[in-house]
Image (spheres, grey):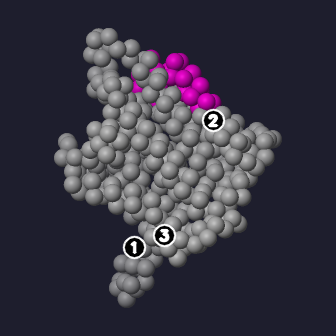
Amino acid sequence: MMRILSGDSPKSPVLAVLLALILLALAFAPFLFPGSRSLETAARICIFIVLVASYDLLLGYGGIVSFAHTMFFGMGAYGVAIATARMGTGYPALAVGALAGMVAAGLVALLIALLSLRVRAIFFAMITLAIASAVAVLVSQLSAITGGEDGMNIRIPRELTPAFRLGEVMGTGINGKILNYYLVFFCCLALFLLMLRIVNSPFGRVLQAIRENAFRAEAIGYRVVLYRALATCLSAMIAALAGSLFAIWLRYVGPATTLGMEIMMDILLIVVIGGMGTMYGAVVGTAIFVLAQNYLKTLMGGMSEATSALPLIPDLLSPDRWLLWLGILFILSVYFFPTGIVGRLRGTR
């Protein structure tokens, strides 16, 4: 087990139990939590764990602030959409689209890195923000290729759609949507373990050294720009693969679903909540954040009805104010867990 985790143990019994519960819940989600909404939530958690972990590889381990991560996420999604539109429904189209999106993301990331990584961190962040905004506008305007603001519907093989029926297991009917979920789950698990291996390799150790003191790392012989460029490319390619899985699961891609700045803000929030520089922080932070996004409004509706006889409280707990309470929860998490939930559980300062 430790070999799979690359020697990076949770280092906390509470964290180990929490990670095990999240893994088991995601692995058996179709059977433990029946219903399309629960399955949608589980799939989104899987995909965003990979997306957030790939960004943490850049920010938490490399110390590189970028606002272009959703651009790479969108490249993977649009790669699958365009490939299926040109090649038709089939697994080769999905593979070609995912590969094309990953390669495109890697090349663009390399270009950005080589042109921009020599500047100060804040200027690099602004450059990536400008490029991501330009790409989002371009995608919206190239309607002949990308579908414009309306986006594109994606045709996937029938075996991955609800119309395909396979049988029944543990009282749950197995259809194509569940098979699609397990495609997402196992691909995301493999990508996460790959990133865990990367950050615990000599390459990952050098990245952390550069994050702590780039001048000292360069003085002892490490080529800082090269390592940062490689980290940027790896992060972008993994984000593109996450985008491909998101497109296959959603069977739709549009500017708002993959390229929106709201998604970038969500990624930043999750990284801070989970803990920067910890792959496990992506798991815990994503699970908490996505569950809050999907169920906090419903929970508040029930609490508002339960306290309807009291003054003022039902108004404060109105489902329309769920974003307010999500913001308060975020502020509290930062205050009580300045190093993130995983950092606090591991006892780091």
Instruction: Please name the residue shown 51% across and 62% down the image.
Output: 41
Q: Within the magenta stretch, is there residue 347?
A: no
User: Can you identify the residue that label 1 sits on?
Assistant: 316
Q: Secondary structure at mark 1?
A: helix
Q: Nearer the viewer, mark 1 or mark 2?
A: 2
Q: Is residue 324 above or below residue 186?
A: below
Residue 259 relative to residue 347: left or right? right
Q: Is residue 147 above or below residue 17?
A: above
Tag 3: amino acid: Phe
**Is any atom of residue 197 visible in this view?**
yes
> Closest to the observer: 311 or 250?
250
User: Can you identify the residue that label 3 sits on?
Assistant: 31
> Closest to the observer: 29 or 215?
29
Magenta segment:
103-125
Residue 86 relative to residue 267: left or right? right
Tag 1: amino acid: Leu
What secondary structure do most residues of the magenta stretch adopt?
A: helix
Q: Which mark is residue 99?
A: 2
Q: Secondary structure at mark 2?
A: helix
**Which quadrant of the view contains residue 209?**
top left
**Which quadrant of the view contains residue 157?**
bottom right
10 Å neighbourhood of mark 3: few (<14), some, or many (≥20)?
Answer: some
